[in-house]
Image (cartoon, rainbow, N blue to C red):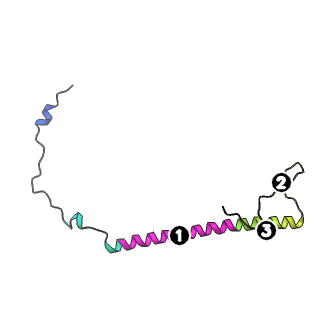
Amino acid sequence: MPDLRWLAAIPSPTPTGPSPTPTGPPAESVTPGVAGFIAIAVVAIVIVLLAIDMLRRIRRAQYRTDVNEMLDAEEAAARGDRSADDDGGDGTSRQSDINPEGPTRG
């Protein structure tokens, strides 16, 4: 292995002038302030309102699907038709899973 002790004997270069001092306000006193607080509060409020609106739209779409299924079942019952969903394929009919009183809550 080569002898590298001679590297330790070489003096490191030193700056020739005084070291620069940082300019500007100290890092401890720099804060986002009132404007930053207001901006974050507005973003948080918008996110909450968007989440509420999204949940409302999802529930509405689910209720519409349930109502459409009930209406389709009522129309089929009124016509006396048996759909492919009610027929097991062997001539026996199955009980429908649709409740005419509305969706069940559990």
The amino acid beneath tag 3 is Leu
The amino acid beneath tag 2 is Arg
State which quarter of the image contains the C terminus: bottom right
Helix, strand or loop at disc 1?
helix
Q: Which residues are magenta?
A: 37-63
Q: Earlier in the sequence, mark 3 or mark 1?
A: 1
Residue designated by label 2: 94
User: Crowding at label 2, few (<14), some or many (≥20) Cα neighbours within 10 Å?
Assistant: few
Would you say 20 lies left or right of 64 here?
left
Residue occupying the point 81% across, 64% down: 73
- Nearer the observer, 82 or 12: 82
Residue 87: x and y in percent read 85, 53
Mark 3 to mark 1 CA distance (whole Å): 31 Å
The amino acid beneath tag 1 is Leu
Q: Earlier in the sequence, mark 3 or mark 2?
A: 3
Of all residues shown, which one is farthest toward the front?
Answer: 106
Task: Name the dominant secondary structure of the magenta segment.
Answer: helix
To which quarter of the image does residue 85 belong?
bottom right
Residue occupying the point 21% across, 65% down: 26
Mark 3 to mark 2 CA distance (whole Å): 19 Å
Query: Disc number at residue 50?
Result: 1
Q: Is residue 32 magenta?
A: no
User: Crowding at label 1, few (<14), some or many (≥20) Cα neighbours within 10 Å?
Assistant: few
